[in-house]
Image (cartoon, helix red, strand yellow):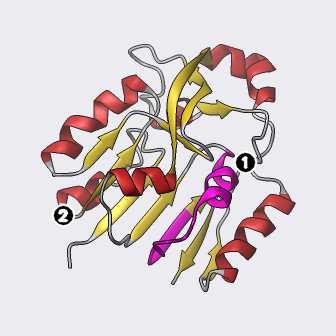
Amino acid sequence: MQKQFIEIGSNDFDTCLPLARNGWKGVMIEPILEIYKNIAPEAEKCGVKALNLAVTDYDGEIDFAVPFLDASAGRHPAQRWVRGIGHVISENHKGMNNIGLLQSPEGRKHLMKTIKIPCKKLDTIIEDSNIKHIDYLKIDVEGHELNIIDAYSWRLIPTFIKIEHEHLDDEGKGRLQNILIGRGYVTYKEKHDIYGIY
C-alpha cells in the first residue's frame, strides 16, 4: 500500500520532503505564502499536494501573524526559528497565548503583520484530498495543536503521530497525551514534541 503523510505546518527547513522524495504521497500544509512557494514546486513534482492555508477547528478564514522574512531572515541555522513563528490568532486558541510574542520587542522585531487567510479542519483536508489512510501525521502549529486535535473525528487513525507541544502549558500537554492514549496510542515525549505510535 502507498505510504501517505499529512504535514500541518511544513515550513521550509524541517519538512516531510525527504519522505516525498522517497515515494511517499500525501499533503503538505503551510500558511505563509513565501514559505509555501519554497516547498510547493518540489512537493508537487513528487506527487504530494501542497496547500497554502491554516488548519484549525472550523472551515473559513482566520487571523494569522506573519513573520518578517527578508532575503536573509532565518537563513542562518541559529535563526531558523524566525521562519517558524507565524501563528494563528484566535479567541479560542487552546495553546499558550501567542499574543505575547506579538507584544514583545523580540516578537515585534520578527512579526511583520496580521493577515486573514483561508483555514480548514483536518477532516475537510482529508476528505478534499481523498485520503484513505495516514501512515504519518505531523503537526507543528505554534500552540494551536489542541484546536486541531479536538476538532478531529478520528475517522482515520494515523499509524504514527508527531505533535509539537512546546507552546502548550502543562495541562495542555497532559491533555494532548491523554487524547492520544485514549485513542490507543503508545506515547512518549521529548522536549518539543510528543509522539504517538498506534
Residue nearer the viewer, 129 or 94: 129
Residue on which disc 2 sits: 22
Residue type at numbered disc 2 = Asn
Q: Position of residue 197 (x, y in %)?
A: 52, 81
Q: Position of residue 63 (x, y in %)?
A: 63, 25
Q: Residues within 10 Å of mark 1 (few under 14, many from 20)?
A: many
Q: Residue at x 54, y 40 (%)?
A: 59
Residue nearer the viewer, 129 or 180: 129
For residue 29, above or below residue 178:
above
Q: Position of residue 161 (x, y in %)?
A: 51, 69
Under circle 2, the secondary element is loop
Q: Which stretch did the figure color magenta?
A: 143-162
The outermost residue toward the left is 45
| Image quadrant occupied by the N terminus | bottom left
Residue 106 occupies quadrant: top right
> Mark 1 and mark 2 in contact (Cβ < 8 Å)?
no
Residue on which disc 1 sits: 167
